Image (cartoon, grey):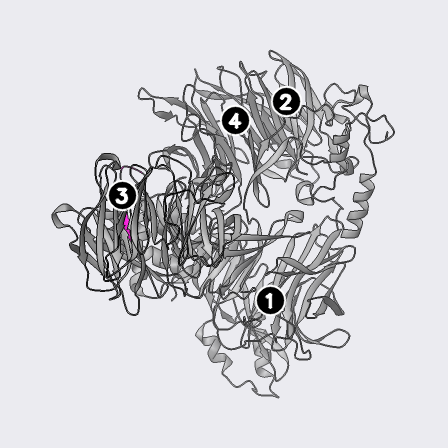
């Protein structure tokens, strides 16, 4: 029975909730986001890039999130409502750099249930109470206070339930220091009125928490429009008039007890002004500035509005809504006090905008409550380019992932992940490569091929570098860093020799090592140490106070700075002969509080690296050694010192060894005695590994240069090693200037490059190619001259690509419902551009669409911005209506990231599926596309559908071969022995290629609902049903028929699947789980029986069909079951690199990517299962969800180890790690090594 290890390699990138506050420090401007089951703390850095401060899995689904601060406190708490049935209050521990649970109170059952609170959350603005509401009936209110020790306390829940009531929204009302109040949008119904056509009344209900009597009362209920859907609390007390803004369709209404309603229309887009569909508000943000406040609201079109209230004390006289800017539709908006707006986009990348204006332009479209028509006024505008906002930073987001393929389409030898993500005009095809994304800042050619590069500061206290030193075979080039980088020949360095090493020591002393001498420079004083007469220097290394050099006759010399603070001279300490050829050398950094380092490392050609002591009592005595296996010879060696993130962990000194075989070895050096332990080995590439010291975010780091550059650094308290997504580098050094504060300078061949890492913590480097419509499917197109290999052997999937020398192209089918085709869209766009929205001076803030001929009062700049062609990624597409489609077929060159061919489809024609097929009747492979015409979603109706076959030439230009009509939507395709398998509704058909259309050869009609995917292994056809799990069909060539060999006993709503081998299939369903099922052995025995039977060979055929119809055919045996927590959209069996094992990679709708790898030994299975048991006790989920219940959401977890839980071991304090390791008869280093080895087997 198989056991799988599930590991998330790219966490979810979608943001469902976002809040801002001061979580780590009183004046820190930070953002907390939930990504489904992940909670993250974000913080913009000095350069304006949003960085992840902390990220953790909560093993539960976060349903609501809010900030919370007690009066007088300087930091914010976080209130989380999840599917755990518990309310959890968190705070951020700065010392441990993690979230800590302050309180956890149980109020109901786990899971997402209709009557269990957790969907809506309301916070009293003064921090005295918290309200939690369910979708129906139940509401709880908690009173929050502080005890004598200033610790947070929380009361028992107070009920505010009401039967037969559905809640649509909840917020805390700012009433100053009066009894806390909460406002809820509710709909009351009777059991006798549950009719489809029933009209229910919606009310704004106010609940009051009586602090004296300690109970909740339902104070009053005001009727509101049935379209009310969103609540915004208005600041009260000394900050504002209090009350609530109720967002209704097309307008806002201000409501407050004993106050008249103030209604104001929302400005609309020109194309939507006369539409029957109104405008809904999707999110909002409140911003306070000293004695004033305003709101930002966003419509479902993405338009941002500024809402202001004119008030005198507690009386509101007017409401104004002004068009602000247009941005992508968001799930949450956060206005930071530093002048930034964080937008958590619903689809696509998240953005950080900087405010360059606050909407004070009088020409902006404005609606006011004083308009004669009040909320029925029609104020129109045309979206324009940014006026008040400036895009400052983007956070990459893959959500939602629709399809994924892992293939080496660019022919580099390592597969890439091609992911379809996004929706509508914000959709993209993204090529993912394992590694950090870099941004190249400078690129220059050098006069020759250099050997090495360093950067040098003028003073040790300087934050920026002053010089770049480039070493050639017989000279040295010095470049000065200022506003520009120019050659400098005015230093005391040796320009006429090759530089082996250069560094800065105490007292601002520069040291340069050349083959002939060691040059010591302090100010205007220059001192030289000549090499021995019979030898020369071959390499060297230095730290703040010591320098070691190696000679050609295998001697090591040690030089030290004398005097305090490095003010003395450089003198030779001692030398030793090692007896072997020295291949590399390194000296340890000086520990904090000490003057000198205690160790140095020397690599020798006898395949060893030896540690020598630099202490006075055992100077240059060997104290330990690391042997390397044949044929590895140490090419380079370096020390790396990581400081602890908190007081519970100790500093770690690592020794890294780069070998000529492309292998790197990492060992832990004991800081007291110098012994080596906990060795880790990793293969980096085919080239020899060269190690170079660097800095990462002001901390130490190491670059290991092989076929790809690898960066070793400390991230969120863990030592990680990840590749950089760039070309092969020959040497590198840290680079810091005013323009590039945290960069790298490197040499590659004869070029000098300066670049910086965009964002640490990312797993994949992304290259985005924009699309026009929502992508539906992608497929790799082989060259037309290269045959498409039909691998039908056991364990191989039919249609699998034979990735050889020639690169492949990527074909994508795109389609959007409620959208226009490209020609119609352009016509409407041009027509709207010719409409000029003029306004009279006295009514410049209102405009009726039926009065186009009014005097112009706009400035030329405003007119220019309105008539500017705006990208659809900013303003979206026009809405066409039900049954209208926009679609195209696109062929993309992944090497050049360009479009080879784009075929726009006709009006209301949509391409929803595709495949590449090598028909036995054709010479070259063909692209097959499933087409529907005028299909409606609700109800689902397909007037007509077709299968189109395209051929393509060497330029990948598509040419239609023919069209085959069909009565249902062709949902999926798969090649099958030179023919084509098609899922048409609930029918499975086999087609061959004809001259004028596809020829139907065989059909099976007894499938339950509809086919969602098809895979083939040998003669078995695995197909996934939309509602009835997997069926295995056999094709009988003798009588050209299909019959069901095996099906499942559980009805599963499948989204994707992948065949593992001849008997095993892995599948994902709509309820966030995946399963592994296996065809029983008895089915294979039936296949081997005589198929001729009796009575003319019809017995077995009838038996096969009868067995399925009567439910007596073979049934799948479920091997594994696991709840991911996110809907799995794609599964593929593959290798992510040539040095890793074959795994199953999956992608989810939330933008996460994970992998399943088998545990091959019983010892590993027992170890990880026991580790899971211990971690469930020692590291319970942060939001109160029981871990094993979460992974068993719908089906008990079976034969799958949660790698995300196991990796929580790395974040435990050392004492807990040792305690768990002792229970497992291990040491912590062994457990960590096992976890790293499994991760390295995947990536």
Q: Which residue is mark 3?
A: 651
Quadrant, the N terminus = bottom left
**In this orientation, which residue lies closer to the viewer: 1153 or 861?**
861
| Vertical relation: 994 (above or below) 511 | below
**Residue drawn at (82%, 31%), measured in percent from left and top?**
849
- Which mark is in front, 3 or 4? 3
Mark 2, other Cα within 10 Å: few <14 / some 14–19 / many ≥20:
few
Q: Earlier in the sequence, mark 2 or mark 1?
A: 2
Q: Main secondary structure of the magenta part?
A: loop
Q: Identify the residue under disc 1.
A: 808
User: Which mark, residue 337?
Assistant: 4
Residue at 36% x, 33% y is 94
Name the secondary structure under disc 2.
Answer: strand
Which residue is situated farthest in the left direction here? 617
Whichever of callouts 2 and 3 sits on the residue coming sooner in the sequence is 2
Q: CA distance from mark 4 to mark 1?
A: 49 Å
Whole-angstrom CA distance, mark 2 to mark 3, is: 62 Å
In the foreground, 705 or 145: 705
Which quadrant is the C terminus positioned in?
Answer: bottom left
Comparing 264 with 638, the one in front is 638
Query: Does residue 670 appear in the picture of this structure?
Result: no
Give the labeled residue for mark 2.
222
Asked whether the beta carbons under mark 4 and mark 1 sit within 8 Å of each other, the answer is no
State how far apart marks 4 and 2 are (Cα). 35 Å
């Amino acid at each position: 029975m198989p056991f799988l290890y599930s590991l998330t390699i790219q966490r979810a990138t979608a943001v469902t909730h976002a809040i801002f506050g001061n979580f780590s420090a009183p004046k820190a401007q930070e953002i907390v986001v939930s990504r489904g089951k992940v909670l993250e703390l974000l913080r913009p850095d000095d350069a304006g890039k949003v960085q992840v401060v902390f990220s953790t899995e909560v093993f539960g689904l976060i349903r609501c999130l809010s900030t919370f601060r007690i009066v007088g406190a300087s930091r914010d708490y976080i209130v989380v409502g999840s599917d755990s049935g518990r309310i959890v209050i968190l705070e951020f521990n700065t010392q441990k750099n993690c979230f800590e649970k302050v309180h956890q109170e149980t109020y109901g059952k786990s899971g997402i249930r209709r009557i269990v609170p957790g969907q809506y959350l309301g916070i009293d603005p003064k921090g005295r109470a918290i309200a939690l509401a369910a979708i129906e009936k139940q509401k709880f209110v908690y009173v929050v206070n502080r005890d004598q020790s200033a610790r947070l306390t929380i009361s028992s829940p107070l009920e505010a339930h009401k039967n037969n009531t559905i809640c649509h929204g909840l917020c805390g009302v700012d009433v100053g220091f009066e009894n806390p109040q909460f406002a809820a949008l509710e709909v009351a119904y009777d059991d006798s009125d549950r009719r489809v056509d029933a009209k229910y009344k919606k009310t704004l209900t106010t609940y009051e928490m009586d602090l004296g009597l300690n109970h909740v009362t339902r104070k009053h209920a005001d009727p509101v429009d049935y379209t009310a859907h969103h609540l915004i609390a208005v600041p009260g007390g000394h900050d504002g008039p209090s009350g609530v803004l109720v967002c209704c369709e097309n307008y806002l209404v201000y409501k407050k007890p004993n106050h008249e309603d103030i209604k104001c229309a929302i400005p609309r887009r020109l194309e939507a002004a006369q539409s029957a569909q109104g405008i809904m508000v999707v999110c909002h943000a409140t911003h306070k500035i000293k004695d004033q406040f305003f709101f930002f609201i966003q419509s479902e079109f993405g338009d941002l509005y500024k809402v202001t209230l004119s008030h005198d004390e507690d009386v509101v006289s007017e409401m104004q809504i002004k068009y602000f800017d247009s941005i992508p539709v968001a799930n949450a908006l956060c206005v930071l006090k530093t002048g930034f707006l964080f937008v958590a986009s619903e689809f696509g990348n998240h953005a950080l905008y900087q405010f360059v204006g606050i909407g004070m332009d009088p020409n902006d479209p404005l609606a006011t409550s004083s308009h004669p028509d009040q909320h029925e006024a029609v104020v129109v505008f045309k979206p324009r380019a940014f006026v008040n906002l400036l895009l400052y930073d983007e956070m990459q987001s893959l959500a939602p992932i629709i399809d994924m393929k892992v293939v080496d389409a660019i022919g580099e030898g390592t597969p890439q992940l091609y992911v379809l993500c996004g929706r509508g005009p914000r959709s993209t095809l993204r090529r993912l490569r394992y590694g950090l994304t870099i941004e190249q800042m400078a690129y220059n050619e050098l006069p020759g091929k250099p050997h090495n590069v360093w950067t040098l500061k003028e003073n040790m206290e300087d934050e920026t570098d002053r010089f770049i030193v480039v070493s050639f075979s017989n000279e040295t080039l010095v470049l000065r860093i200022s506003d520009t980088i120019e050659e400098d020949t005015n230093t005391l360095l040796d320009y006429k020799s090759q530089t082996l090493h250069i560094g800065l020591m105490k007292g601002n002393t520069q040291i340069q090592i050349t083959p002939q001498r060691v040059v010591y420079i302090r100010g205007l004083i220059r001192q030289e140490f000549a090499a021995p007469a019979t030898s020369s220097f071959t390499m060297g290394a230095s730290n703040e106070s010591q320098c070691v050099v190696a000679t050609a006759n295998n001697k090591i010399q040690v030089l030290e700075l004398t005097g305090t603070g490095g003010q003395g001279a450089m003198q030779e300490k001692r030398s030793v002969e090692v007896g072997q050829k020295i291949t590399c050398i390194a000296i340890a950094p000086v520990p904090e509080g000490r003057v000198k380092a205690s160790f140095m490392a020397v690599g020798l050609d006898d395949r060893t690296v030896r540690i020598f002591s630099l202490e006075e009592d055992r100077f240059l005595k060997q104290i330990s050694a690391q042997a390397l296996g044949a044929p590895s010879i140490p090419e380079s060696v370096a020390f790396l010192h990581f400081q602890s993130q908190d007081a519970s962990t100790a500093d770690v000194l690592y020794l890294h060894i780069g070998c000529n075989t492309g292998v790197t070895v990492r060992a832990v050096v004991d800081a007291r005695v110098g012994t080596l332990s906990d060795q880790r080995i990793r293969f980096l590439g085919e080239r020899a590994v060269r190690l170079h010291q660097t800095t990462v975010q002001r901390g130490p780091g190491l670059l290991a240069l092989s076929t790809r550059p690898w960066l070793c650094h400390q991230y969120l308290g863990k030592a990680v090693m990840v590749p950089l997504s760039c070309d092969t580098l020959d040497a590198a050094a840290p680079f810091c200037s005013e323009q590039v504060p945290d960069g790298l300078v490197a040499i590659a061949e004869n070029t000098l490059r300066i670049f910086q890492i965009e964002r640490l913590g990312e797993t994949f480097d992304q290259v985005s190619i924009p699309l026009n419509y929502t992508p539906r499917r992608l497929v790799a197109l082989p060259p037309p001259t290269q045959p498409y290999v039909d691998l039908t052997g056991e364990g191989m999937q039919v249609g699998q690509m034979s990735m050889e020398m020639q690169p492949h192209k990527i074909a994508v089918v795109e389609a959007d419902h409620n959208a226009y085709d490209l020609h119609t869209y352009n016509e409407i766009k041009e027509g709207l551009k010719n409409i000029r929205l003029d306004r009279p001076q006295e009514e410049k803030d209102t405009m009726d669409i039926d009065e186009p001929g009014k005097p112009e009062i706009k400035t030329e700049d405003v007119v220019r911005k309105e008539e500017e062609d705006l990208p659809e990624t900013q303003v979206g597409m026009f809405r066409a209506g039900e049954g209208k489609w926009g679609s195209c077929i696109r062929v993309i060159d992944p090497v050049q990231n360009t479009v080879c061919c784009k075929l726009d489809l006709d009006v209301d024609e949509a391409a929803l599926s595709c495949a590449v097929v090598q028909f036995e009747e054709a010479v070259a492979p063909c692209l097959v596309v499933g087409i529907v015409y005028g299909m409606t979603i609700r109800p689902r109706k397909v007037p007509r559908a077709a299968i189109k076959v395209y051929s393509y030439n060497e330029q990948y230009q598509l040419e239609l071969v023919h069209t085959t009509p069909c009565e249902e939507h062709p949902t999926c395709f798969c090649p099958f022995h030179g023919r084509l398998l098609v899922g048409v509704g609930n029918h499975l058909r086999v087609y061959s290629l004809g001259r004028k259309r596809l020829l139907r050869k065989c059909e099976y009609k007894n499938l339950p609902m509809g086919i969602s995917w098809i895979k083939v292994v040998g003669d078995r056809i695995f197909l996934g049903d939309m509602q009835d799990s997997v069926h295995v069909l056999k094709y009988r060539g003798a009588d050209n028929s299909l019959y069901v060999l095996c099906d499942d006993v559980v009805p599963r709503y499948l989204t994707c699947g992948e065949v593992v081998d001849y008997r095993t299939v892995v599948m994902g369903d709509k309820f966030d789980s995946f399963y592994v099922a296996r065809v029983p052995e008895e089915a294979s025995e039936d296949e081997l029986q005589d198929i001729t039977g009796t009575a003319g060979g019809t017995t077995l055929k009838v038996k096969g069909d009868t067995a399925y119809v009567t439910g007596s055919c073979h049934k799948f045996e479920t091997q594994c079951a696991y709840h991911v927590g996110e809907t799995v959209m794609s599964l593929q069996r593959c290798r992510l690199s040539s040095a890793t094992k074959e795994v199953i990679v999956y992608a989810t709708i939330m933008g996460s990517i994970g992998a399943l790898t088998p545990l091959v030994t019983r010892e590993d299975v027992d170890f990880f299962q026991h580790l899971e048991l211990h971690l469930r006790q020692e590291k319970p989920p942060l939001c109160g969800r029981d871990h094993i219940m979460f992974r068993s959401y719908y089906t008990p977890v079976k034969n799958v180890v949660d790698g995300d839980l196991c990796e929580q071991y790395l974040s435990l304090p050392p004492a807990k790690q040792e305690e768990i390791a002792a229970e497992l008869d291990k040491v912590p280093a062994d457990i960590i090594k096992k976890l790293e080895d499994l991760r390295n087997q995947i990536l």
